[in-house]
Image (spheres, helix red, strand yellow):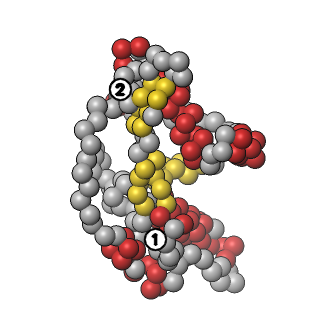
Amino acid sequence: MYEKGSRGLLFEVTYYRCRINLEVYHALTDGTGAVQFLRVLVYHYLTVRHADRFAGGLPAIDYDASATEKMDDSFRKYYTHTRKQHEDSPNAYRLRGPCLPENRIAVIEGVMPVKAVLKEAHAYGATLTEFCAAILMCSIEKEMAMRHKKRPVVLAVPVNLRSYFPPEAPAIFSASFKPAIIFENSQTGWRM
């Protein structure tokens, strides 16, 4: 599962202090499948690492899916392919900046009370995801040079299709929504 120096790994599990990190290549699974995989991984780690605590037998693990549901390909079951006429659109604005040594990734972590953020999102008539996406887009706009504000800021926001279709299957069953906004020097400051 691991080859030193290999760049084609499909997932990576690391830890830092009391936190476990799981990075998964998007074609391997979606967020729900990754969370289920991490739960099973931690379960097996704990049962091996602390075997003495499970002398009376291992606790049952809830996989959130039956054996049939695990094998079901929901995407194939519900997807119908139709060709759409694509509109010509300008190239999206691309974030640029200095690279970290060895192309490492920096993680910025923040903590906010969910109830307060939801209250603010609902004040704008938005969901939590819509509100966070809008904040990200506005943050990007503040860093844009004026000459770039005619180019759209586009995000790829994952949508968990399991909340719209049964069953709860661990296979990939997600899509992405791509909201775009063009910030311009106008009275409103922006247009969609």
Callout 2: SS: loop
Q: Quadrant of the C terminus?
A: top left
Task: Give the labeled residue for mark 1.
Answer: 170
Q: In this orientation, which residue lies closer to the viewer: 24 or 155?
A: 155
Q: Which residue is painted at 46% across and 81% down in the image?
A: 69
Q: Quadrant of the N terminus?
A: bottom left
Q: Is residue 18 above or below residue 139?
A: below
Q: In this orientation, which residue lies closer to the viewer: 148 or 70?
A: 148
Q: Which residue is painted at 47% across and 64% down in the image?
A: 161
Q: Which mark is residue 151?
A: 2
Whether residue 142 sits left or right of residue 123 in the image: it is left
Q: Is residue 41 visible?
A: no
Q: Is residue 123 visible?
A: yes
Tag 2: amino acid: Arg
Q: Is residue 182 above or below residue 2?
A: above
Q: Is residue 169 above or below residue 135?
A: below
Between the C-alphas of marks 2 and 1, the distance is: 38 Å
Q: Which mark is residue 133?
A: none
**Residue 35 picture location, percent across and down:** 53, 61
Select label 2 or label 1 by which is in front: 2
Residue 89, located in which quarter of the rendered image? Answer: top left
Q: Which residue is painted at 24% across and 59% down in the image?
A: 83
**Residue 88 picture location, percent across and down:** 25, 38
For marks 2 and 1 on the same chain, the one whose residue lies earlier in the sequence? 2
Tag 1: amino acid: Pro
Q: Which residue is painted at 53% across and 26% down in the image?
A: 139
